[in-house]
Amino acid sequence: MSSEHQGMIGAAGGHAAQLGLEVEQLRVVYGDFVAVDDVALRVAPGESFGIVGESGSGKSTVLRAICGLARLATGTVRLLGAQGEALPAPGSKAFRRRVQMVFQDPYGSLHPRQTVDRILAEPLAIHGIGGAEQRIERALDEVGLGTGFRFRYPHQLSGGQRQRIAIARALILEPQILLLDEPTSALDASVQAEVLNLLEELRSRRGLSFILVSHDLAVVTHMCERLMVMQRGRTVELLAAADLAESRVRDEYTRRLMIASSGFRRVA
């Protein structure tokens, strides 16, 4: 039996050591516009952390800066693991394998002329990972689709199915941290709960850490243990999700955000 196949069996039977993430003094600038200014956060290994704020608050830019899609003007990003554990540097291929992102629009993030099979095989090829056949089958099973979807194109899938493929593409590299940028906002209400439940199940099964960006406070309080409120690129406050659900907030902006969030309630 090859070492690659042994690694796959080990991954299927358990998960790698959990990783967390720390961001300090993060600043992202586009020309004269400061998109993110002096943001700091710390996500413990295995934790689910939310970022909320109105449109243009900089929350999605924080995720893009973490994964290298937005250039840092200043600041640091580093992984957190067991004491003494050697961890890859941000921007490296090893870092990108451990930290994967799921984007808001599943149709826009999937290549329209590639089959699901090729979409899932591409990250494996980039990272030089073998056993593609078994890994693709397992990834599709994990997101509840099965191998019957392997040779379909994105336009042949529903919105919920496309987002499941996007999640499978992120998971196929066996990351330890998922960055989720409004993962259900482009979906019909009827399938949003299905995708959120899938993400929760995957987090539990794989021991993943989440950073979830959303404008929906009910989603964040349901999915996350702690959260950061952002306004105009800056942190307004950090609080526990339970405190937000019980309206135990300090800042007036957070209170206004709660009022503006139509039908805000904690999901049971």
Image (spheres, rainbow, N blue to C red):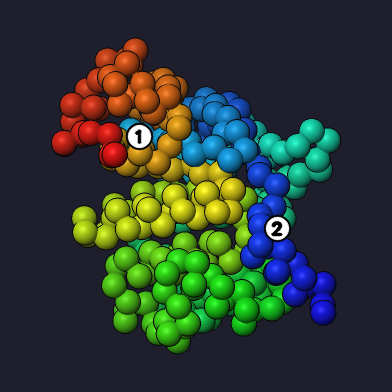
Tell which of 35 and 87 is nearer to you: 87
With 79 as the anchor, is 67 left or right in this view? left
Decide which of tag 1 and tag 2 comes sooner along the chain: 2
With 108 as the anchor, is 1 left or right in this view? right
Neighbor class of circle 2 (other Cα within 10 Å; few <14, some 14-19, many 20+) is: few
In the picture, the disc for residue 93 is 2
Q: Are marks 1 and 2 in contact (CB under 8 Å)?
A: no
What's the residue at 45%, 78% (across, down)?
146
Which quadrant holds residue 233? top left
The answer, for residue 253, to whether it is visible in the render is: no
What's the distance in space between the residues labelled 1 and 2, CA to CA? 32 Å
Q: Given the image, on which type of amino acid does mark 1 rest?
A: Thr
Image depth: mark 1 or mark 2 in front: 1
Q: Which residue is mark 1?
A: 221
What's the residue at 27%, 60% (across, down)?
191
Q: Given the image, on which type of amino acid does mark 2 rest?
A: Lys
Residue 64 in the image, given as x and y percentages of width and height: 50, 47
The answer, for residue 39, to whether it is visible in the render is: yes
Q: Quadrant of the N terminus?
A: bottom right
Q: Please tell me whether mark 1 sits on a helix, a strand or a loop.
A: helix
